[in-house]
Image (spheres, rainbow, N blue to C red):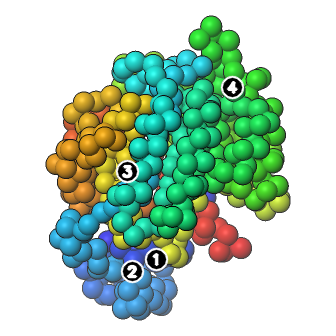
């Protein structure tokens, strides 16, 4: 299976199963679908001889045949044969999202967590619940050494003292249990101060800083509960925090959400860059169509245009020495993720769990509050192994929409929570999200091709 497309003046061909990428001339680009249909060399020549010379066509067909022989064009699917074993594989828990605070000091209009409450009550995680969650992770991680814990909310800084105590506890168990914790933090920045920055720079492998881009966009979608905007308070803190982390060689991301109100979201990404940030992401909002901010099918042409515009501008800035990393355009064409990641994605419900303030387990943060997906708790462990088994079977071969999609090994089937929200099944796919993901993959590959062709 191949996927061919034009972007920024390049004719790009992706061999889906091998991951090989080719930048080809016009003749080869036109010949490839005829070759895929099984047309003979003579038929191809007769079809295209008015546009190209016979020697050009012959040369291109020969090259295609050689690339096929080498396994970098029209290669076979080597992953399908692993599915039976893949379904039976023993999984261990390696990551947790600790909902340290089901409360928030902002009132973001698109928040799936309902201002931190997650369809329930406001609550802060106690140290005891958090400690039991870390113990569960240690005990259920098998021989795996590296474990990840994300402090999440609501707003985790509203429960900062417990965050610090849990980091201390985790560190105290590392040597004894032969584990290494990678702690991360997601924050809106309202309560950020020098003490928190210093601690985070010592203990947090990554921090995610929530900002929706330009001041007018951010303040409309991320206000305080009194309606006042948050931009002026948090941006100087984020700039300082990012600078400190860059100086120390530490990871961070400025992460935003774009909605129907800023379909020109490339301007928000460029605004991040102009503020001095170098690591960034902006995600499309996921909302029901009746929400005024929700992205709709008719918005897709504009969104596709924005991704292409952004890719070209980021290439330009990189050549000028002003390069930044946009998460969705960072793609590894040589190594790529392991087979498990390629087939099943984030590992929600199997390798990754979300933990509520009172200790309940859910497959991920987006399922929290949906009792249908309550898997157990820190006291009893996993009590609904059937949910775990269902997520174990969730992969690109279990999703009809993924089987013939060229991007399946890059998105790994997309978000299970979004699929369930829109279709009632984790083995479906969120269609608008799929279209946007495919465009991001195309743009990311184009950028790699452009750099290789320089």
> Could you tell me if the residues under marks 1 and 2 are in contact, i.e. CB atoms within 8 Å?
yes
Does dot 1 land on a helix, a strand or a loop? loop
Q: CA distance from mark 2 to mark 3?
A: 46 Å
Q: Which residue is mark 2?
A: 73
Q: Residue at x 68, y 12 (%)?
A: 228
Q: Which residue is mark 1?
A: 20
> Could you tell me if the residues under marks 3 and 4 are in contact, i.e. CB atoms within 8 Å?
no
Q: Which residue is mark 4?
A: 190
Residue 224 visible in the displayed image: yes
User: Percent position (x, y) of residue 118?
Assistant: 40, 25
Q: Earlier in the sequence, mark 4 or mark 1?
A: 1
Q: Earlier in the sequence, mark 2 or mark 4?
A: 2
Q: Residue at x 37, y 35 (%)?
A: 359
Q: CA distance from mark 2 to mark 4?
A: 51 Å
Q: Earlier in the sequence, mark 3 or mark 4?
A: 3
Q: Nearer the viewer, mark 4 or mark 1?
A: 4
Does dot 3 land on a helix, a strand or a loop? helix
| Number of other residues with Cα within 10 Å of mark 2, as a class: few under 14, some 14 to 19, many 20 or more | many
Q: Is residue 144 above or below residue 390?
A: below
> Could you tell me if the residues under marks 1 and 3 are in contact, i.e. CB atoms within 8 Å?
no
Q: Is residue 180 above or below residue 326?
A: below
Q: CA distance from mark 1 to mark 2?
A: 7 Å
Residue 2 visible in the displayed image: no
Q: Nearer the viewer, mark 2 or mark 4?
A: 4
Does dot 2 land on a helix, a strand or a loop? loop
Q: CA distance from mark 1 to mark 3?
A: 41 Å
Q: Is residue 12 above or below residue 438?
A: below
Say left or right for 452 vs 120: right
Q: Which residue is mark 3?
A: 136
């Amino acid at each position: 299976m191949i996927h061919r497309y034009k972007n920024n003046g390049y004719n790009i061909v992706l061999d889906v199963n091998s991951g090989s990428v080719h930048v080809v001339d016009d003749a080869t680009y036109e010949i490839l679908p005829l070759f895929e249909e099984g047309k003979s060399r003579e038929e191809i020549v007769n079809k295209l001889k008015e546009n190209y010379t016979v020697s050009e066509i012959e040369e291109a067909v020969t090259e295609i045949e050689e690339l096929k022989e080498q396994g970098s064009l029209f290669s076979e699917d080597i992953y399908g044969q692993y599915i039976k074993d893949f379904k039976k594989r023993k999984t261990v828990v390696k990551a947790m999202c600790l909902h340290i605070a089901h409360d928030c000091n902002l009132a973001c209009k698109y928040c799936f967590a309902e201002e931190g409450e997650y369809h329930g009550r406001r609550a802060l995680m106690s140290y005891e619940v958090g400690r039991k969650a870390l113990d569960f992770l240690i005990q259920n991680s098998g021989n795996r050494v590296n474990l990840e814990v994300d402090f999440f909310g609501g707003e985790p800084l509203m429960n900062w003292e417990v965050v610090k105590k849990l980091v201390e506890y985790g560190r105290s168990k590392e040597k004894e249990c032969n584990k290494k914790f990678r702690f991360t933090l997601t924050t809106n920045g309202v309560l950020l101060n020098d003490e928190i920055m210093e601690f985070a720079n010592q203990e947090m492998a990554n921090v995610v800083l929530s900002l929706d881009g330009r001041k007018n966009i951010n303040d409309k979608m991320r206000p305080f509960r009194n309606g006042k905007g948050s931009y002026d308070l948090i941006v100087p803190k984020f700039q300082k925090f990012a600078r400190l982390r860059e100086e120390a060689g530490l990871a961070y991301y400025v992460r935003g959400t774009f909605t129907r109100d800023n379909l020109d979201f490339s301007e928000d990404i460029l605004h991040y860059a102009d503020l001095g940030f170098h690591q960034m992401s902006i995600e499309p909002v996921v909302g029901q169509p009746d929400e005024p901010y929700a992205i709709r099918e008719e918005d897709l042409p504009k969104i596709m245009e924005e991704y292409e515009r952004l890719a070209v501008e980021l290439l330009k800035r990189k050549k000028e020495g002003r390069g930044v990393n946009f998460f969705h355009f960072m793609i590894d064409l040589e190594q790529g993720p392991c087979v498990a990641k390629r087939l099943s994605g984030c590992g929600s419900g199997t390798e990754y769990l979300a933990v509520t303030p009172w200790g309940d387990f859910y497959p991920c943060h987006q399922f929290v509050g949906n009792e249908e997906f309550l898997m157990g708790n820190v006291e009893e462990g996993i009590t609904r192994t059937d949910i775990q088994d269902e997520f174990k079977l969730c992969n690109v071969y279990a999703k009809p929409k993924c089987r013939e999609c060229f991007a399946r090994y890059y998105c790994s089937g997309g978000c299970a929570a979004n699929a369930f929200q829109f279709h009632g099944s984790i083995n479906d796919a969120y269609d608008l999200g799929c279209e946007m993901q495919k465009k991001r993959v195309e743009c990311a590959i184009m950028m790699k091709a452009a750099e290789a062709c320089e």
